[in-house]
Amino acid sequence: MLDRVLIFDTTLRDGEQAPGFSMNAVEKLEMARQLAKLGVDVIEAGFPISSEEDFEATREVAKQVGTVEGSPMICGLSRVGLADIDRCWEAVKYARRPRIHTFVATSDIHLKYKLRKTRAEVLRAAQEAVRHARGYCENVEFSPEDASRSDFDFMCDVLEAVIEAGATTINIPDTVGYAIPREWGERIARIRERVKNVDRAVISVHCHNDLGQAVANSLVGVMNGARQVECTINGIGERAGNASLEEVVMALRTRKDIFGIDTRVKTEEIFRASRLLSHITGIHVQPNKAIVGENAFAHEAGIHQDGVLKEKLTYEIMRPEDIGRSSNRLVLGKHSGRHAFRVRLKELGFDLDDTESDKAFKRFKDLADKKKEIYDEDLIAIVKDEMTQLQETYSLDYLHFVSGTGLIPSATVRLKKEEELFQDSGVGDGPVDAVYNAIDAITGLKGRLLDYALRAVTSGKDAIGEVTVRVDFDGTVLIGKGSSTDVIEASARAYLNAINRVVLPVAQKLKEVGP
């Protein structure tokens, strides 16, 4: 049995299937690079046969992330159909260590109502699929979907057959989050006893959070012999989500006295991965979220504050530094120079080239003139915003708006495209609507705003406002992000970010991301 727990990250596959969390190829590449820095063992990059974009994204992750020395295994998901497996292999074959993950439901509910197949047909299809996948690569994973509601003996027969056919990992999924810890632990233990050739494969668990038990079930699985946990950053995923990677990893590390086993995850990269995912998807972590929530290391009650001031261990079982979170948040001000700025960015995990650094430094100095205190979160926001805006067709050159009680809100916008300037005006129900109408008039694109979210990056009246929008351009829904101390400017930047995603071809996006 393995002497550590493998972390199989499915943020880019199961995670992005959740409504509002979809990612394009560029965003998947950015997230995959951070997952590699985090030190996960396997990245499930997508479901290649599900769409052309998912195929391209999985292939690019395999090519650009999976070929680096020491990189994680790159995995693609497929059903048991042979064409699915062929398509999956076409996407992951470029990685140093490719894996094919194939699955079929084994519960009677799924067999009767979804698959409309007999148990014998499903067992045969599972065997054939694994054998076919094994013809392509050594690492083949098999999952009996809806394992928690499957007939135990039949499921074990399937597992035994697929291991015989060449599966190197057998993943036991609680697909609908039905299990509770005691029964789930017993099921994993019984699989080890019942499946004769189980010693030839790694047992994995994939738990959903419909009853709030995903992390608990994953951990009890480890206690009963599972040596791979499938999870996602921030616990995103179908319905109520998946087991949260940060919670699983930090529970194993913090309570090693109980579990006696750890992962190889570089925990100092956890907070950065969490915030990157929030930035990409535009969906922020709830404040009381374990490990990565804003309140995870905050103390307001007097008794707690008194205890922490005397000794942090009184109310903190982990250090914020353990997950890459700075305990000293105030870092720079308006008198800080370029060198200190670049050093701090490197400490925060940003390795910018000269062009990126110059643009980010200008944004920093502009911000420092407006704010008394600059926090790490401010720096992360402006750098991320600047990196997002670098690949742009249109950039904001000038913005003026008028709004107030008894006035019709109006805006004048000037955009830069290459070396040309274009200016137009618009009116609307409010200043943001007026700005967007002016931008539409310049670009000739008409976006329909589906969702608009504004959050303060830090506290205080002078905080940076971070705006995230979801915009529908003739059936293509895209997310845009922008930040500024002026929320109308941030709104304009977010909308332009979405427009630039429309006008920039996918092939060019992939090229500009680079290896």
Image (spheres, rainbow, N blue to C red):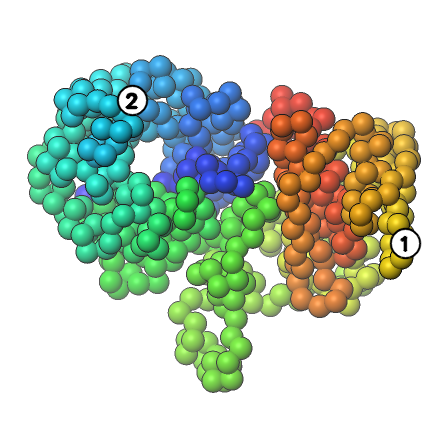
Q: Secondary structure at mark 1?
A: loop
- Which of 74/208 is in front? 208
User: Looking at the image, is 22 positioned above or below residue 213?
Assistant: above
Tell me what residue is drawn at x 84 percent, y 38 percent: 438
Tell me what residue is drawn at x 13 percent, y 32 percent: 154
> Which mark sits nearer the N-terminus, 2 or 1?
2
What amino acid type is highlighted by mark number 2?
A: Val
Tell me what residue is drawn at x 60 percent, y 68 percent: 328
- Real-space CA distance between mark 2 and mark 1, rounded to the nearest whole angstrom: 62 Å
Q: Secondary structure at mark 2?
A: loop
Name the spot of residue 379 as percent of width and height, x first. 68, 55
Tell me what residue is drawn at x 75 percent, y 38 percent: 496
- Which of 489/304 is in front? 489
Asked if residue 358 shows in the view, the reply is no
Residue 80: which numbered mark, if any? 2
Q: Name the residue tied to disc 1.
A: 407
